[in-house]
Image: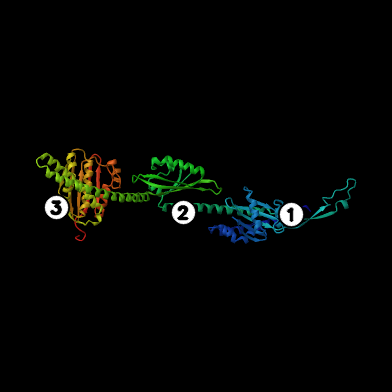
Amino acid sequence: CDLLTKLVCTQLMSFRTSANLKKMVHFHGVQRRMLTQMAAENNYLTVVGDQIADLIEITDAEGAALVMDGQFKTFGQTPEVEDIGKLADWMDGMPDFEVFESQHLSGHIEWAEKFSEMASGMLAIRISYIRQGYLMWFRPEVVRTVKWAGEPKKMQDKDQRLNPRKSFETWKELTRGRSDPWTEMEVESATDFRGALMTIGLKRAEEAVQLGEARFLQLTNALPHPVWTADDDGVLTFVNQKWLDQGLGNDGRWFEQESLAIEDRHQTGQAWKVSVAKGTPFELEVRFCSPLEQTERWNLVRAIPYFRANGSRAGWAGICTDLTDRRQREATLRMTEKLALTGRMTSVIAHEINNPLEAIINLLYLLADRVTDDEVARDYIGSAENELQRISGITKQTLRWSKESVQKAEYGTAGAMFKDVLQLYAGKIKNRAVTVTIEGGEDVHFFGTIGQLGQVMANLLANALQAVSVGGRIWLSAIAEGDMMEIIVRDDGQGMSDQTLRNLFQPFYSTRGDLGNGLGLYISHEIVERHGGSIVVNSQLGVGTEIRVRLPARSPAAS
């Protein structure tokens, strides 16, 4: 009998093991089929949604639901979508859970009793820690009849003796709100499927991070502006290629860069602290000195905070926009307005001076006729007339420049122009004992407005006289070069610095303080360019300066 019992038990265990093995193979087959399709798709969760009908076979359930960020896919016997959403919210309150299983869901959630008929049991897995993502399987209620040996809730009278037939008479009770229990194999199948999903999700996340980084680098490096990111302390965490191309560093606090103008560093650091403290966007105009160009350029620096999924601030993203050209255009506009006003005032002043000047010249002429016997007095009167003629020449030249539109281009020689300007500055040349050497130019012709080009030559000579010391030397020369000619003004003065050379032709820029208006070279440059020529300046501190003016040698029609 014992042997027969053992044989029967062994056979029953074999049948059960075979059934379990067959069930396990089926579970794994369904998982393998779904996971193969998911691995081939970029959005693997789409496959889960499309194949949701196969999900119920993973746990032998009657219904299944996929929840992802408020989107639902269901199949089979499931609660209403609204109730599934409430279940997802309930599980959000258990951040540490990975797998949940129960055959008596209403025992955990009272309001689950309303759908216990179709979903008394639930097996759920979390498929995302960042987004709201769950897979749920449901089993319907199974009404069972439980037989008791006697009614369990009925109390026996203490004086009444037990009667085997009556006291232990079979009592039946119906149980509701429960489903078939989830077997260990079914829970393991769901757990294994979750592990595979998380592995695929991790791989996709890594690929997405790599793709995002590549896209971010490509985008930021394609921008024509320096782009950077930094932490709350301002320490750089990323810079694009444009930032590096401008000679800026890629570590340390961005507002402590050596290329940031010293005058702007304190103000920038304080403004950054305020933005970080308040969490507001940062915006400030600052100056960067490019090590490559050795020039200061104005930049509008903007930075905004960016945040993690949990809402905490992760850092700041910034961009620098070059404002130098815009500022120069604005400055040029202001200077143009000032030049226009200066021109009008100059014309009025020259006109007002010219009228009494002619009267003084006439009076001196009459005075000279009356002084006939005093040679010294006549010499003084002659000198006064010469100086007045020089002043008259200057005012007339100024008036011609202010009315340049009515002047016509004509041929002239460099030698004649040299003679005129030397006569204009003869007094100053003599007083400073400056030696002026003319090297050619008598037969070198140019084509242009003589009055305007004379103004250019006068400005160049005036600057040379200002640059040389007492007893210094100036050389004037001219050479012909085909359709062009070149005038050269050279001196042995103190020379100019690189900064002065960079600003030499800017309006109102002067190294003489209140003694100069900064318009001479600016006007000269404009006149030469309008004639189709150019001005090149070479200077060295302690050696001197050489200015070369190229002008057309003949009219465009003749060329």
Tell me the crowding category of disc 2: few under 14, some 14 to 19, or many 20 or more residues within 10 angstroms, Cα based: few
Q: Residue at x 49, y 43 (%)?
A: 276
User: Which residue matches tag 1?
Assistant: 9
* Residue 491 visible within the image: yes
Residue 185: x percent and y percent?
66, 54
Residue 14 drawn above or below residue 422:
below
Q: Give the image's coloring scheme.
A: rainbow
**Residue 365 pos. (x, y %):** 14, 46
Report the amino acid beneath label 3: Asp
Closer to the camera in the image, 402 or 548: 402
Identified at 48% across, 54% down, the residue is 211
Q: Going by the image, does 113 lie left or right of 70? A: right
Circle 1 residues within 10 Å: few <14, some 14–19, many ≥20: few
Q: Nearer the viewer, mark 3 or mark 1?
A: 3
Residue type at mark 1?
Cys
Q: Secondary structure at mark 3?
A: loop
Front tag of 2 and 3: 3
- Say whether disc 2 or disc 1 marks the residue closer to the N-terminus: 1
Q: CA distance from mark 3 to mark 1?
A: 132 Å
